[in-house]
Amino acid sequence: MTIYCDESGGLNAGAMTFAAVMLTPQVAADIHARFRSVTGLRSELKGSRISVVERAYLLELFDRAGGRAWVAVAKRDTLTQPPDGAPLSDLALYAALLNLAVGRWLPETGGVCTDVVIDEGRYDVAILAKVREEIQAGLGRWGRASLADSRRSEGVQIADVIANSLFNIAVASPRAHRIQRMIEPMLASKTIRVAELQQVA
């Protein structure tokens, strides 16, 4: 299995979410092929760009294919500030959310070799390489952590849609109510599980 990772939002936007989606590469490719054949999408699949109906269809395909996700969520208004009073950076929050989401998966892998693929698009590659090294240390000999260009990774693009869906809910966007209705059955079935980050260590 592979864990595909991507984030949505930021402190200035009121919340940041980080999705760690477990799929095989073949299933991720199959979801994409079906979604694109029905919707006609030719560009990169992004949660911020698709319609509500397209989002619902993508989530339905993900659910039917047996996909699962942990999503770490941090809301600016409920996040405990660092004890030293220093401003919290988006990068520190990103790293904490990544560690939380992927950390929830590791006990469930049963020692099976798991690859973690992280979107390389948000921060400088050199900075993300350090984040990747931390995840690799946690995986040990059980898997491999790597960075990927989201435009070339179907799994990362699916993670983007799921992260963006929880971001919309977290900030109560105009689409939040409809997205909440879409997500509720997946939360009830634990297809998508949410872990709230309260403080960055």
Image: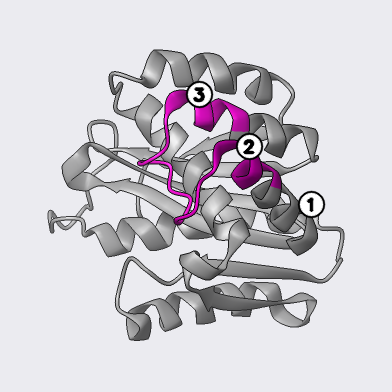
Q: Which dot, 1 or 2, sits closer to the camera?
A: 2
Is residue 148 depicted above or below 170 in this figure?
Answer: below
Q: CA distance from mark 1 to mark 3?
A: 32 Å
Mark 1 or mark 3, earlier in chain: 3
Residue at 79% x, 40% y: name it.
Answer: 65
> Which mark is first along the chain, 2 or 1?
2
Q: Earlier in the sequence, mark 3 or mark 2?
A: 2
- Magenta range is 34-57
**Residue at disc 1, secondary structure:** helix
Q: In the rendered image, which residue does mark 1 sit on?
A: 108
Q: Are marks 1 and 2 in contact (CB under 8 Å)?
A: no
- Residue 93 appears at what percent x and percent y? 33, 55
Nearer to us of marks 1 and 3 is 3
Kindly report the distance in space between the C-alpha atoms of the residues bearing marks 1 and 2. 34 Å
For disc 3, the marked residue is: 53
Query: Which residue is denoted by mark 2 in the rendering?
Result: 38
Q: Secondary structure at mark 2?
A: helix
Q: Amino acid at mark 2?
A: Val
Q: In the depicted view, which residue is nearer to us: 102 or 57?
A: 57
Callout 3 amino acid? Val
| Whether residue 1 can be seen here | no
Q: At label 1, which amino acid type do we have?
A: Glu
